[in-house]
Image (cartoon, grey):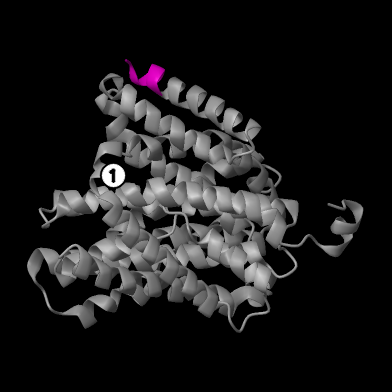
Amino acid sequence: MSFNITLAAILLGGWLFSRIFSMLRLPNILGMVVFGILAGAFASPLIPPLLWEVEPMLKSLALVVILLRAGLGLSKATLKKTGVTALLMAVIPCLFEGAALTLLFHWMFGFDWNVSGLTAFMISAVSPAVIVPSMLNLKERGYGEQKGVPSIVLAGASVDDVLAITLFSVFLGLARTGETQVATSLLSVPLSIGGGIALGAILGWLMSAWFQKRHESLRATEKMLLLLVGAVFLVQLGEVLHSATLLGVMTVGFVLLERAEKAAHELAKKLSKVWIFAEIILFVLIGLSVDVPTALGAGLKGLAVISLGLVFRSLGVLVATMGSPLNQKERWFCVIAYLPKATVQAALGGVALQNSVAQGEVILALAVLSILFTAPLGLVGIKVFGKRLLDLPFEESQENPQ
């Protein structure tokens, strides 16, 4: 099968399954993932090698689109209102789950401490590809906006990923080399976060100045093209400098909203249209990367460990929101929103095996199992409980009584 036909099949199949799942009152994203899993299971020999070569680029571009949309929806006023809670949500749940999983993998799977650590923090990362569109959908419909609940989850999840990926890299280095300079390695966490924000702020400032100066002469589509190109270059630069590129991309959108609000609203509308295609490609590719037999190889013991990790992550969310203005229903929604895993696990699941780390095949199986278990759980949870646990603004709830 040619690459062009394969890409067309991904778009058509992903769209059809998303519509079917929507009619079944299930998240449309889940339909895309299921189509990807089925296509990988039954049509894998027909997939051209070129697709796997461009897969990282396609995933990266889709993430750039959704993270720019997230940044363009985060205002300074919202961040001031949610800042402390979002910061605690970024750190505490990840560390709770990562620490618990490190102990569990050491005791139940017999991994050494370094391998346990890298596996734990690879699995503990939440999925921006699942969380960001779900939170944006709730924001657009007004749910939880009085206290900025979707914004808290958006901001917290982006840093959560940075922390998890950085700690995964630290433990991977230790597992490969036996290095013992853990304290030095951990310094890379704040440096990575600070570097990503700084790069994003610089690019956002430059683009906002350009868009303000050329607002009338540049069409919205041209602005979007320049923004996407700039964000892709930012991601590449961040990889070279080892900075938090995901956070940097979101920062670009945030700065644009603050400094060039009219252009930012134009860009948000354009990116929402591009996301229709990017969403299908991203989630079908995540499904294609799932190897069901490998996941089943992790067995019930793997599922039990992942479930216990989610318990500790949920405790971390409750601790992080303990002193916040959120009520009990909103805090439990944050617990549900922090469950899904997919993107990071799909990207990093095979890294240990590629680096000849002991138990690499088991680690890959655990990554796949975490996607199969938590992504549907989180997607359905957000879909079902978002409207039940989050309030609409008073005016809207009076106009549209449930």
Q: Is residue 185 left or right of residue 247?
A: left
Kind of residue indicated by mark 1: Ala
Q: How many marks?
A: 1
Determine the residue positioned at 33% across, 48% down.
369
Q: Is residue 129 magenta?
A: no
Q: Main secondary structure of the magenta part?
A: helix
**Nearest the camera: 119 or 153?**
119
- Callout 1 secondary element: helix
Residue 270 location, x and y as percent?
A: 63, 40
Residue 71 location, x and y as percent?
A: 57, 58
Residue 171 visible at all: no
Residue 261 visible at all: yes
- Compared with residue 79, is residue 349 higher up or lower down, i.e. above or below? above
Determine the residue positioned at 18% across, 65% down.
115
Write down the quadrant of residue 48 in the picture. top left
- Compared with residue 74, is residue 294 higher up or lower down, i.e. above or below? above
- Compared with residue 152, is residue 32 higher up or lower down, i.e. above or below? above
In this figure, which residue is indicated by the disc labeled 1?
295
**Nearest the camera: 330 or 251?**
330
Determine the residue positioned at 26% across, 69% down.
104
Residue 118 location, x and y as percent?
A: 24, 64
Q: In the image, which residues are magenta?
A: 1-6
- Compared with residue 316, is residue 300 higher up or lower down, i.e. above or below? above
Residue 2 location, x and y as percent?
A: 33, 16
Q: Residues within 10 Å of mark 1 (few under 14, many from 20)?
A: many
**Nearest the camera: 59 or 143?**
143
Q: Is residue 92 left or right of residue 49?
A: right
Q: Residue furthest front?
A: 300
Q: Is residue 5 magenta?
A: yes
Q: Can you say which quadrant of the picture contains the N terminus?
A: top left
